[in-house]
Image: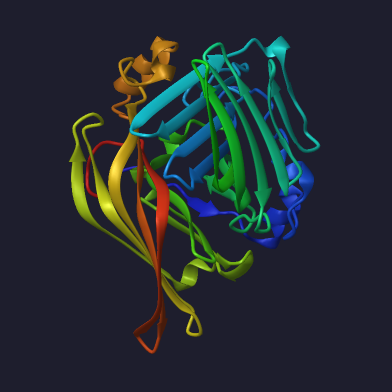
Amino acid sequence: MGKQKTARLAKLPVDYQRLGLKKEIALWEDGHRSNGKFGEYEWWYFDGRMDDGSSLVINFYTQPVTAALPFYRPSMTLSLTHDGQHIQDNKEFKLKECSFSREKCDIRLGNSYFRGNLHTYEIHYETDRVQADVRLTSSASPWRPETGHFLFEDKHVFAWLPSVPEGRAEATVTVDGKTMTFTGTGYHDHNWGNIGMFWVMHHWYWGRAKIGDYQVISSYITARKKYGYEHFPVFLLSQNGEKLGDDPRYLTYTQAEPEFDPITQKHYHRKLVYDYNDGVRHYRITYAAEKIIETFVVADAKTSVQAKSNPVLNWIVKTAGLAPSYIRMIGTVTLDRFAEEKVIEHVEAPGLWEQMHFGLDEDV
């Protein structure tokens, strides 16, 4: 039996020093962080949960997350759920059509762009079929769990920066000549790494919601078996943009109501509970799924855009015994505030969350 490998969140003083980071987040952190080396990936993500119940997701990539190529293959994707319809769109670009600033978030793919300054962001998405313009104004300070770098064997990295934990989103989307306007709550984060996530992670749940005056970001990452199924709980709760708690030592995570998804051939949980109790503040956040709005298997050309353009990767993934898949859900997110084990405040709101499952369908 091989020796168990290490997995940890970089949070020591030496980690901050080595990464050139401080507790306060700098503008350059939301800029271009990768170099196009083999195994690297990077993306800038926006999602909006709109006042009319619609959801809008836009992603800009240096290369597809699962590609693991020694060069850039920039692309962007859009997903819109509105009035009972689900619209998906994507486009790939030649590198000479693109630019990536290292000083700040200023990403350009052809005529499209994703740019901002940790407070205000503008996103323009343009293909033959779909045009979208988004303005996102933050109502909460940028945040990351410690350095935001999850380390595997202290050499492989998955990094995460929620640049806008919550903000006001205004969007105009035109699909096949029909224009729609939306307002709602929005979110932006930035991820990058130097190894395919399916080599180091088993699965994760991630979600975020605006619940009345409260904002929550939550994630629960489980590493692969060779890392001892190490768990990484991540949680941020704010009220009117002011942080209430983010220390994982005070977090208890549970999941319930398992369901089987026939497309991904994976189980997921309809209910996720994050209970945060630091002895002074006690909050319980409950995600209750109502509908799956997007699902795909990474190596299945029938469900995944990336699989259609990367048959070699599909063969590698299947040969390695992996089965990466994705499920995005919407439903109701509930916040309960306790005093001496009694609920003294109860708030509900729509939310959006996801399961990314890289391993096989087994209990962990």
Q: Residue at x 31, y 29 (%)?
A: 322
Q: Residue furthest right?
A: 103
Measured as percent of width and height from the top left, residue 219 is found at 45, 53
Residue 2 lies in what quarter of the image?
A: top left
Estimate the x, y position of residue 288 in percent, counting from the top left.
30, 55
Residue 190 visible in this rendered orientation of the protein: no
User: Where does the image place residue 204, in percent across and percent down from the top left?
Assistant: 39, 46
Q: Position of residue 332 (x, y in %)?
A: 35, 55
Q: How many numbered circles are shown?
A: 0
The answer to whether residue 173 is above or below residue 12 is above
Q: Quadrant of the N terminus?
A: top left
Q: Quadrant of residue 144?
A: bottom right
Q: Residue at x 54, y 39 (%)?
A: 182
Foreground residue, 83 or 30?
A: 83
- State how the image is colored: rainbow
Pick the residue in front: 164 or 51. Answer: 51
In the foreground, 161 or 241: 241
Q: Is residue 122 visible?
A: yes
Residue 319 drawn above or below residue 10: above
Residue 294: name its quadrant: top left
Residue 83 vertical placement versus 37 (above, below)? below
For the point 39% across and 16% down, which residue is it? 307
